[in-house]
Amino acid sequence: MPSLYFVQGIPYVVVMSLSTVIYKNMSVSNTDVALYTSGLYLPWVIKPLWSPLVEMMGTKRLWTTLLQLGMGAALAAVALTLPMDRFFQLSLAMFWLMAFASASHDIAADGYYMLALPQHTQAAFVGVRSTFYRLANIAGNGGMVWLAGELHDEGRDWAHAWQTVLALVAAVFIGLAAFHAWRLPRPANDAPAPREERQWQHFFAIFGEFFRKPGLLVIIGFLLLYRFPEAQLLKLATPFLLDPTSVGGLGLDNKAVGLAYGTVGLVALTLGGLLGGWIISRVGLKRALWPLVLAMHLPNVVFLAMAWTHPGHLWIICAALAVEQFGYGLGFTAYLMFMILVADGPHKTAHYALCTGFMALGMMVPGMWSGWLQSQLGYLHFFGWVLVAALPSLLMTAQIQVPDDFGKKQAAA
């Protein structure tokens, strides 16, 4: 599980986070960065359309290993495009290919996770899988951003600095994919679907089963709106750190961002994820839900405070981001466990993919307008809006139903 979710996190962080830094370094506007990189969420939005194929054809292990090799090749292709004249269009095309492969890999890997572990162990391991997923984020938003800044300081232009970083990442990724093809365990229940379940009628029956779930509108509303504030903040967090103080940013360089947001912040997020998973396994999702939800949204006030005060000391920025990311790590575990609850059943792989598709749609649409909104409001008022945008999430949280002791580790008989 640790190495599987580390590998799952790498292409996602490259597509959704590093792409914004790369384009910012190469002088693409905030509006274009937010619009076009938010569009890259689309494969995660529509992946439920082919999720039953993963359920019906082959094993989750086979899908996982083949897609990992494909994503390694896509990483190398992105590196090749960056020094070219039409780098923006070409690299976006390669990011799209990587996004489709990564979204498909998520279906297989998450299905593998739910097949390999019993429910209470899934709750306990939510923090572990989040930890190693976030370690991939640390490697990306921390190590890769820092290394690109170091190469740039040594005299390389941004295109060749990022080309070197991404080529290195591609080599490491392909090595990990080969390791998984060799060593990933083979759960006994990870088997191809019976022949009678590989018909098109069964394909559509899997979708129908999901859309007949009780309280479906509330479920979809929660999945769409839980991350509504974060969807807008996420696209502007790194530009805010990099932009000069004259336009409302904090004026950090790549190496400082790699330390503050990509390392200190993500370590705090990882610790929050571990604690959130432990809390749910001890008291259940129902009792932990509201404290975890509030822990996720309230710390966003640190961005408003930084936009107001423009702290000049890196340690203050690091501390503020640690608070915000720790709270997010706590709150996201509740979201993951709710998706596991909704997906529970004989077709959990496809149904979990449907849940994550709605999650991705909830991230894509607000992210697309966030760059334009920030350019109209400025950073200070934009972060004030992000706090107000938590209200729909809180309203939907009040509507969902969670069984008593769901996710709680049961005492041994």
Image: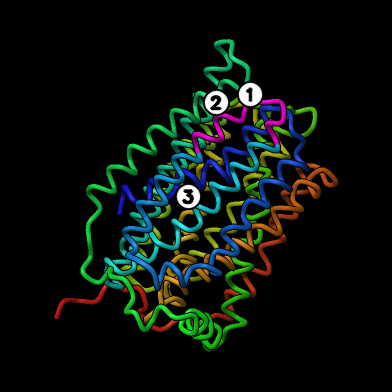
Which residue type does callout 3 highlight? Phe
Which residue type does callout 1 highlight? Pro
**Which residue in the protein does label 3 denote?**
326
Q: Position of residue 334 (x, y in %)?
A: 46, 66
Res. 345 in view: no
Task: Please report the bounds of the magenta region as a residue range.
Answer: 75-88
Q: Position of residue 331 (x, y in %)?
A: 49, 60
Distance between the alpha carbons at the discs numbered 2 and 3: 32 Å
Q: Earlier in the sequence, mark 2 or mark 3?
A: 2
Residue ID at (59%, 73%):
222
298 lies left or right of 62 = right
Q: Nearer the viewer, residue 319 or 222?
A: 222
Residue 395 sits above or below residue 88 on the image: below
Q: Earlier in the sequence, mark 2 or mark 1?
A: 1
Of discs 2 and 3, which sits in the foreground? 2
Q: Secondary structure at mark 1?
A: loop
**Which residue in the protein does label 1 denote?**
83
Q: Secondary structure at mark 3?
A: helix
Q: Is residue 76 magenta?
A: yes
Q: Position of residue 170 (x, y in %)?
A: 44, 34
Residue ID at (64%, 74%):
395
Q: Position of residue 150 (x, y in %)?
A: 52, 18
Pointer 1 local density, CA inside 10 Å: few below 14, some 14–19, many at least 20: some
Res. 340 in view: yes
Q: Nearer the viewer, residue 313 or 144?
A: 144
**Which residue in the protein does label 2 denote?**
163
Q: Nearer the viewer, residue 315 or 199?
A: 199
Q: What residue occupies the far right of the structure in this picture?
A: 376
